[in-house]
Image (cartoon, rainbow, N blue to C red):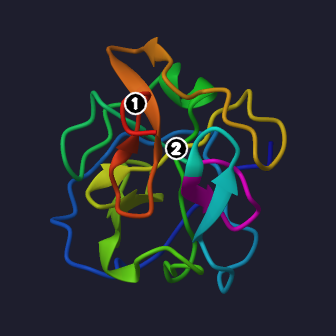
Amino acid sequence: MVAALTVTAVALSACGGQALQGNSAATTVPSPTASLVDVRSIPAYGRVLVTATGKTLYLFTADPPMTSSCTGSCVQAWPPLVVRGAVRAGSGADGKLLATSERSGGERQVFYAKHALYTYIQDAKPGMATGEGIKTYGGTWWLVSPSGKPVTSTSR
């Protein structure tokens, strides 16, 4: 896993900026100018959101809109996607749905369609989606479609 970066990003859209809990296992962006959120087709799931390096992104059903409830040990398994610099949408992602909100440690967590975005520690390489449908920490983890909706077994 890439080491965590602290972040100073500015949101692309007004998001209300609720302070969130900090973490030390955040998924990072390789450079401030890289596309942060891209779209990739994953067999059995279709087109889903991924990081600039191809890591699959998830949403957490226990999170209220524009808020992350994944803290403590949760962030070790489900690192939040944080950014340094401006947030950008890659091919297939909608930049109007991107926003950031500051976590308590000063990191800027990325949101898409008001869902906090996370990676999963068990997804060792691009294209893996081993976290899909896992129920833990009081909610369920789903892949995210380019429209911002969860990719569930009923939506495939």
Crowd tier of the residue under label 2, counting other residues whose Cα lies within 10 Å: few below 14, some 14–19, many 20 or above: many
Q: Is residue 5 visible?
A: no
The residue that mark 1 highlights is: 70
Q: Where is the N terminus found, in terms of image quarters?
A: top right
Front residue of this view, candidates 22 and 2: 2
Give the alpha-carbon distance from disc 1 to disc 2, as whole Å.
Answer: 9 Å
* Residue 111, magenta (yes or no): no
Front residue of this view, candidates 8 and 141: 141
The residue that mark 2 highlights is: 118
Residue 15: x %, y % from top left: 20, 68
Dot 1: element = loop
Magenta range: 47-56
Q: Amino acid at mark 2?
A: Tyr
Residue positioned most to the right: 125
Q: Relative to residue 93, is residue 86 depicted above or below?
A: below
Indicate which disc, 1 or 2, sits on the residue closer to the N terminus.
Answer: 1
> Residue at coordinates 43% horizontally, 14% vertically from top-left?
135
Q: Is residue 52 visible?
A: yes
Residue 83: x %, y % from top left: 55, 67
The circle drawn on residue 18 is none
Dot 2: element = loop
Crowd tier of the residue under label 1, counting other residues whose Cα lies within 10 Å: few below 14, some 14–19, many 20 or above: many
* Residue 52, magenta (yes or no): yes
Q: Relative to residue 46, is residue 14 depicted above or below?
A: below
Taking 29 as reference, is 1 left or right? right
Taking 54 as reference, is 101 left or right? left
Whether label 1 touches label 2, CB < 8 Å:
yes
Residue 66: x %, y % from top left: 23, 53
> Residue at coordinates 58% horizontally, 72% vertically from top-left?
84
Taking 103 as reference, is 25 left or right? right
> Residue at coordinates 53% horizontally, 39% vertically from top-left?
23
Front residue of this view, candidates 144 and 59: 144
